[in-house]
Image (spheres, helix red, strand yellow):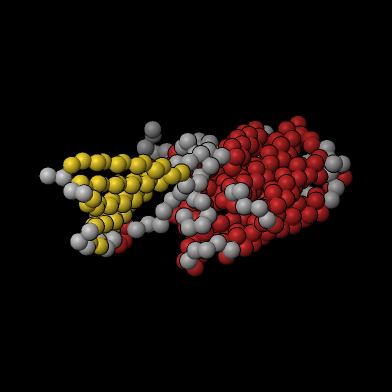
Amino acid sequence: MDPETSIDDLPRFSPVAFNDHAGQLWIVTILSLIYSALVVTARAYIKYKMFGFDDILIALALVFHLAQSIALFAGLNSGLGKFNSITPMEQWATSSKSTLAAVILGLLALSLAKCSLLALILRIIGSRSGKMKLFCIGLMVFSSAWGIGSCLALFVNCRADTLLSMITVKKCPNQDKRWAVITAIDIFIEILTWLLVVRLSWTVNMSFTHKCQVVMAFSFRIPLIALSACHLAYFGKYPTSAEPQFAVTNSLLFQQAMIAWSLISATVPNLRNFLKSFSIGMGFPLPVDLSTYGSNNVYALRSLENNHSKATSSAAVAGTPGNWRPDQDLNQTRVSHYFRSNNREIALEIEEGSRTGSQEMIINKEVAWSITYGDHH
C-alpha cells in the first residue's frame, strides 16, 4: 500500500454518506442474524434431548429470520438504503420487492417467536386444566392469526414493485394505517402474554422471590413494545418521502432489532437460573440452587437412635457447579433403617432418585429398593 494513501481513500464495501445509509443496514442485519443464531444454538445445547414444540417454533423463526436477511441483502444490492435520485429506476422495482419480502418474512418470524414463548408457557401449565390453559391456547392461535393477517394486509391493494417508488402512495395506499393496526395488535399480544405469566406465577405455591424471577424472565419481552412503537414511527415516514428507498432504512433497522430481540427474549426463560424457580409445584425439573448453604452439597438430617432401633436419614444434592446442561443434575435421597429381630439384623435401604431430563420437562422419578438380610455375629 502506498504510504501516501490515506485510509479514507481505500475502497469500502458499503460507504455511509448523507444520501447512502445502506452500510448501516448491512451491519445491523448481519449482527442481528449472528446474535439470533448464537442464542438459538445455545438454546439447542441447553435443551438437548428435551426438545418440545416451542423449540421447533423458535427454529422456524430463525429460518424465517435468515430468509428475510437474504431478501434484505438482495435489496441492498439494488439500491435499498440510498436516495432514489442516485439509483437507476430499474432497480427500484427490485428493491421494492425485496423490502416487501423482508417485511413479510420478518412478521412471520415475530409471530413464530410469540407462539414459541406461549408454547413454553403451555408446557409449564402441563396437564392442568382451567381458564389459563384455554387462554394460553387462544392467545397462541391469535398470535398465529396476527402473523398471517399482517402479511395479507400488506399485500392487499398494493403492487410490490412500486413500494419504494415515487408513486407508492397511489399504488400502495394507507400504509400508515395498516401498520398502525399491525403494531397495535402486536403490542396488545405482548401485554397479554406478560399478564398471563404474572397471573400464572401468582397462582403457584412458591416464594415471592421465585415468582419475581419467573416474571423477570418473561419481562425481557417488554422492550419489544418500545421497539415496535419506534418501528411504526419511522415506517410511517417513507410513503410520502421523495426518497423512499432512503427513508425506509430506519424502520428496517428497527425491524432487525425487533426480530433479534424477539428470538433472544423467547430463549431467556429456558435458561437454568430461571427454570429453577419452577421447581416447586410447576413440574419443572431443576431444583432450587442450594450451593450457598454448603461447600460439599451434602446436607444431613438429624439421626434418631434407641435400644431397639436406629434410623438415619440423609439427603444429598449432587451437581456440577456452573453446569448449563439441566439434565446432568441429580437429586438423590437415601433412607436407611436398621433393626434387630431374633439376633438377626435386617437392613432396609430405600434409594430414591429424581433426575431431570424428562422429555416433557417434568420430574422423572426413579425408585430403587435394596434389601439385605443376614445373620448377626
Q: Position of residue 308 (x, y in %)?
A: 22, 59
- The structure residue drawn at horizontal position 49% and vertical position 50%, both measured from the top left corner, is 284
Vertical side of 333 occupied by 82: above or below: above
Whether residue 31 can be seen here: no
Q: Nearer the viewer, residue 218 or 171?
A: 218
- The structure residue drawn at horizontal position 28% and vertical position 51%, both measured from the top left corner, is 336
Q: Position of residue 264 (x, y in %)?
A: 54, 48
Q: Position of residue 348 (x, y in %)?
A: 29, 47
Q: Nearer the viewer, residue 184 or 34?
A: 184
Instruction: Tell me where residue 292 sits by quadrant.
Output: bottom left
Horizontal side, residue 98 vs residue 34: left or right: right
Whether residue 197 can be seen here: yes
Q: Position of residue 196 (x, y in %)?
A: 64, 59
Image quarter where the N terminus lies is top left
Instruction: Tell me where residue 183 sits by quadrant.
Output: bottom right
Residue at the far left: name it. 377
Vertical side of 315 occupied by 109: above or below: above
Image quarter where the C terminus lies is top left
Q: Nearer the viewer, residue 112 or 64?
A: 112
- The structure residue drawn at horizontal position 16% and vertical position 45%, both measured from the top left corner, is 376
- The structure residue drawn at horizontal position 20% and vertical position 46%, both measured from the top left corner, is 344
